[in-house]
Amino acid sequence: MLYAQAELPAHLTFRTEYLRQFRDDRPGLSEDAYIWYAKLRWNFRPDAYFNYRYNVGDVDDDGKDDGVSAKTIRQSVHTFTLGYQPLPPVRIKLEYSSNRFDRRRENFNFWGISVGYIF
């Protein structure tokens, strides 16, 4: 696993991580799997941020949907997050992600809102 983070001017943070998994040979699945992501976070106010994250990696598909044996497929995701902290223990996130697969799975988009309380 490799990891790097840099605090940049203008309240920007860049982060990236790469993970490679060496695994036993299993029919239909890739011998090695990897996941990589990079993100840029902008804290445009002390209580709010905008985050963009791109990740790509291998996903093991069990093949149950189409009756075909398991395979390793590639997934890529673009995620946009707007976060806000109205009170010190309260966190609110609005998130959109676009999920794309190289084959066998249907692409999809995700919208979500999360409200959390840190205690």
Image (cartoon, rainbow, N blue to C red):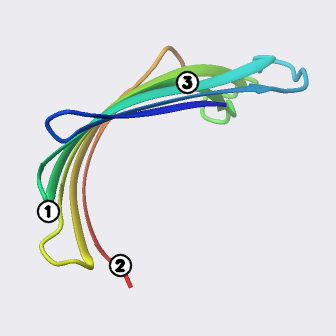
Q: Could you say where residue 72 lies in the image, as x and y percent from the top left? A: 67, 21
**Which residue sits at x=35%, y=78%?**
118
**Which residue sits at x=49%, y=14%?**
102
**Which residue sits at x=14%, y=62%?**
47
Viewer-side residue, 23 vs 106: 23
Identify the image quadrant of the N terminus.
top right
- Identify the secondary structure beneath mark 1: loop
Q: In this view, does 88 lie to the left or right of 36?
A: left
Residue tagged by mark 1?
47
Residue tagged by mark 3?
57
**Which residue sits at x=69%, y=34%?**
62
Identify the image quadrant of the C terminus.
bottom left
Residue tagged by mark 2?
118
- How many neighbours does mark 1 have within 10 angstroms: few (below 14), some (14-19), or many (20 or more)? few
- Report how far apart the C-alphas of labels 3 and 2 lie in the structure: 31 Å
Looking at the image, is mark 1 or mark 2 earlier in the sequence?
1
- Report how far apart the C-alphas of labels 1 and 3 lie in the structure: 32 Å
Vertical comparison of 54 with 50: above or below? above
Q: Could you say where residue 100 lies in the image, as x and y percent from the top left? A: 40, 23
- Identify the secondary structure beneath mark 2: loop
Confirm whether residue 103 shows in the render. Answer: yes
Q: Is residue 61 left or right of residue 15?
A: right
Confirm whether residue 105 shows in the render. Answer: no
Residue 105 marker: none
Q: Which of marks 1 and 2 is in front?
A: 1
- Identify the secondary structure beneath mark 3: strand
Q: Say what amino acid the circle numbered 2 marks.
A: Ile
